[in-house]
Image (tube, rainbow, N blue to C red):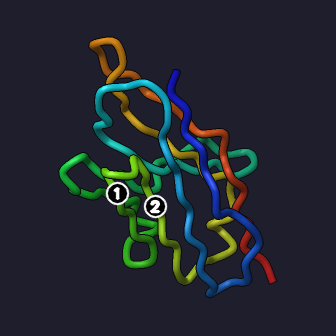
Amino acid sequence: QVQLVESGGGLVQPGGSLRLSCAASGSYFSINDMGWYRQAPGKQRELVASISSGGSTNYADSVKGRFTISRDNAKNTVYLQMNSLKPEDTAVYYCNAEVGVAGRWTDYWGQGTQVTVSS
């Protein structure tokens, strides 16, 4: 069984910063792409940023220049550094990973962590 455990959410003022972490654990042979999604109340879940096993990154236009995704393959952990946060960044943030288990790739999700940007 594979688990993704997130941490680092919370309440921050506009213009502030937060760093999210997501660690994978369990029985698997490899992790391919990892990413962060978010879902605000009344809206669909959307991709925030993703990173391949080789380090190639992709960002939503709304966070380019403010957020940075990175990963530590030795620790099976992906990070999201969020700077210059805006109220519209308020959402539940979910970690996602494509994990190799029993000979095939399967998507796994974390439980979500709340990020609230408010004064």
**Residue 107, located in which quarter of the rendered image?**
top left
Residue 56 falls in image quadrant = bottom left
Counting residues from the start of the chain, the first of labels 2 and 1 encountered is 1
18 vs 116, left or right, is left
Single out the mark in the foreground, 2 or 1.
1
Residue farthest to the right? 119
Q: Nearer the viewer, residue 114 or 40?
A: 114
Residue at 66% over, 39% down: 111
Three-letter code, disc 2: Tyr
Q: Residue at 68% of width from left, 63% of height from top? A: 9
Question: Callout 2: 10 Å neighbours few (<14), some, many (20+)?
Answer: many
Q: Residue 110, percent across and down?
A: 59, 39
Q: Which mark is residue 79?
A: 2
- Calculate the distance from the C-alpha at mark 2 to the C-alpha at mark 1: 8 Å
Q: Secondary structure at mark 2?
A: strand
Give percent across and percent down for residue 31.
Answer: 32, 36
Q: Specify whether 81 is left or right of 59.
A: right
Q: Quadrant of residue 90?
A: bottom right
Q: Report the residue at 52% width, 73% height from top.
A: 82
Q: Residue furthest bottom?
A: 15
Q: Amino acid at mark 1?
A: Asp
> Do callouts 2 and 1 mark residues in contact (Cβ within 8 Å)?
yes
Question: For the residue labelled by badge 1, is the local secondary structure a helix, a strand or a loop?
Answer: strand
Position of the C terminus by quadrant: bottom right
How many numbered callouts? 2
- Identified at 72% across, 56% down, the residue is 114
Q: Is residue 115 above or below residue 100?
A: below
Label annotation for residue 72? 1
Relative side of 101 to 54, left or right:
right
Say few, some or many: other residues with alpha carbon within 10 Å of mark 1 (under 14 / 14 to 19 / 20 or more): few
77 with respect to 3 (left or right): left
